[in-house]
Image (spheres, rainbow, N blue to C red):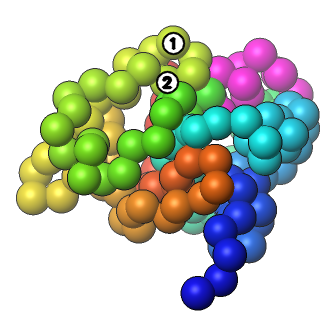
Amino acid sequence: MSEQKNIVETAIEMGDFSTLISAAKKLGLFNKFSNEGPYTIFAPIERAFEPIPDSVTDEAFEDREYLMDIINYHIVEGKYLTSGLKNIQTLTALNGKTLKVSKNGKLLVNGIEIKKEDIECTNGVIHVIEEILIP
């Protein structure tokens, strides 16, 4: 079994989060999510960004406050494995807004299915989603 890595290292190693990684880098969040925690990340895979025109993504990257709000809506303080999420109805994201957790045969966050769950890291956990959470 390989040694656990922090959230940033794990996300980079997984290779399917390039836009998310770019946003975190632009916002100077690498240190925070490498060394602090624990955090639970609902990480949209790269495919989630495909329907969005490049011009819209570029605009979001230029608006630091907006970009931070979007990124922080995908992150919760604390480590929530799916076994714990099944017993929770809401979580507060780092931007202070509420995420709704529900079950419909599958575990959902704001109606978006968690496709790959419980990717444990030294400072938290990553759950993979296929859409972007919009505050």
Residue 63 shown in magenta: yes
Which labelled disc corresponds to residue 43? Answer: none
User: Looking at the rendering, which quadrant does residue 111 occupy?
Assistant: top left
- The residue that disc 2 covers is 93
**Residue sitting at x 52%, y 52%:** 125
Residue matched to label 1: 96
Answer left or right for 121 relative to 81: right
Magenta-colored span: 62-71
Q: Main secondary structure of the magenta part?
A: helix
Residue occupying the point 18% across, 58% down? 106
Q: In the displayed structure, would residue 6 be above or below residue 36? A: below
Location of residue 5 with respect to 2 vertically, above or below: above
Q: Position of residue 62 (x, y in %)?
A: 88, 28
89 sits left or right of 114 in the view: left
**Residue for point 73% across, 36% down:** 36
Q: Secondary structure at mark 1?
A: loop
Given the image, on which type of amino acid does mark 1 rest?
A: Gly
Foreground residue among 121 and 127? 121
Q: Are marks 1 and 2 in contact (CB under 8 Å)?
A: yes
| CA distance separating discs 1 and 2 | 5 Å
Q: Is residue 111 visible?
A: no
| Total count of labels | 2
Between 8 and 36, the residue placed more toward the observer is 36
Image quadrant in which you'd find residue 56: top right
Q: Amino acid at mark 2?
A: Ala
